[in-house]
Every structure is written in C-alpha cells, then in structure tokens.
Amino acid sequence: MSFGDPNNPYGAPQGQQQAYGYPQQGQAPGYGYPQAPPVQAAYGAGVPETMPGSVSAARVMLWVIVGLQVIGVVLFAISAVSVSAAKKDDTLKNDAAFQRLADYSAGMLWAIVVFAVAWAVFAAVLAVKFNSGGNGVRITTLVFGVITAILGLYPFIVVGLVHTVLAILIACFVGGSKGSAWFNRPRY
C-alpha cells in the first residue's frame, strides 16, 4: 500500500503530503506551556460589557419608585398640614369621617414624610450605583426590594400594590444570573 492510493483508508489525506519531523496541522505540540482556556470558558457565559436589559429595567423601576415616593411625600405633607389646621376648626368636631382622619397625629404624618424621603433617597442612591457598584450593591438592592414589597403589602395595600410589584421585579431581575454576572464582573 502506498500513500498515493486514493482508496487507502490509512493513507495521507488528499491534497496534503506527509511532513516528517513536524507535527501535522491541527495537532498541538506535546511540549511547552499549555494553552490558556478561552475567555468565555473561564467566566461562564462571558463577561458582560454592557448592562443587561433586565438589570437596566431594574434600575428604571428604582427610578419609578423614587418618583412614587416623591408623590407620596407631597401627599403626606399636605395631609399633615391639613390635619393640623382642621383640628383647630370647631365645625369639624362632629364629623365622623374627619374624626377617623384626626386619629392620626400630625407628628405621625410628618414621621411618614421623613421615612418616605429617606426611602426615596435610598432608592436613588441604589439606582445611581448600578453602573459602578459591585456585589454589595446587588445584595443591598435585593434587600431593598424585599423590604419594599413587604411594606407595600401591609400598611398601604391599595396604593402599595404598585410598589410591591415593582419591588418583586427588581429583586428578581437583580437576583438573577444576568444581574449576578453584571455586578460580579471584573473591573479594570
């Protein structure tokens, strides 16, 4: 059998000649340093260079929560001022609907205003940190989402439903694999 026979299964491939002393094409040399794995193999699905859509959506939802908090601050501040002024009015002392509203003290309404402002600032800081923040921002955002969902359910059931839905989505998007890859990416 010669290598020239085209029907020989053990012969050299067609169009190539056997080169003695050198490795054939496609074979790695058996000496030297091993090749480095590809970048995608070292980091799983690849290092994200741009923010994934779900993480970007979570950041937008944080800004929506900031906007809703600002609206809530304005409404609670107006309520605190109006309750303080109405408690001094003698004509409303016999009104049952007003008496239920007057059970809330103006101090408690102002405390809710302060809490709502603090929560809005906290959400804004988290939204700003999405580009440069690490895994700590991710975990803090997860905790923020869970607490916001709980607070949206208990005291403010009707109004807090939007907060609850947004907070659950934020926690899901940030806690997912794309969120983890974004916040754990290497920064050079």
Image (cartoon, rainbow, N blue to C red):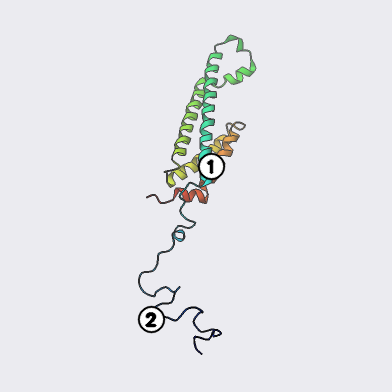
- Choose between 89 and 34: the one closer to the eye: 34
Query: Please, which residue is most extreme toward the top here?
Result: 90
- Choose between 174 and 82: the one closer to the eye: 174
Q: How many marks?
A: 2
Q: Which residue is mark 2?
A: 21
> Which amino acid type is shown beneath numbered disc 2?
Gly
Residue 35, percent across and down?
A: 40, 67
First in residue order: circle 1 vs circle 2: 2
Q: Quadrant of residue 156?
A: top right
Residue 139, percent across and down?
A: 46, 45
- As measured in the structure, the alpha-carbon distance from the residue carrying label 1 to the one carrying label 2 is 59 Å
> Which amino acid type is shown beneath numbered disc 1?
Ala
Residue 172, percent across and down?
A: 55, 45
Label 1 vs label 2, nearer the camera: 2
What number is the disc on residue 172? none
Q: Is residue 4 above or below residue 38?
A: below
Residue at 39% of width from left, 49% of height from top? 187
Other residues around mark 1 within 10 Å, as few (<14) / some (14–19) / many (≥20):
some
Q: Answer yes or no: do the residues labelled 1 and 2 have beta carbons within 8 Å? A: no
Query: Please, which residue is most extreme toward the bottom here?
Result: 1
Residue 23, percent across and down?
A: 41, 77
- Choose between 94 and 139: the one closer to the eye: 139
Left/right of residue 144 with respect to residue 92 in the rendered view: left
Q: Is residue 136 visible?
A: yes
Q: Which residue is mark 1?
A: 57
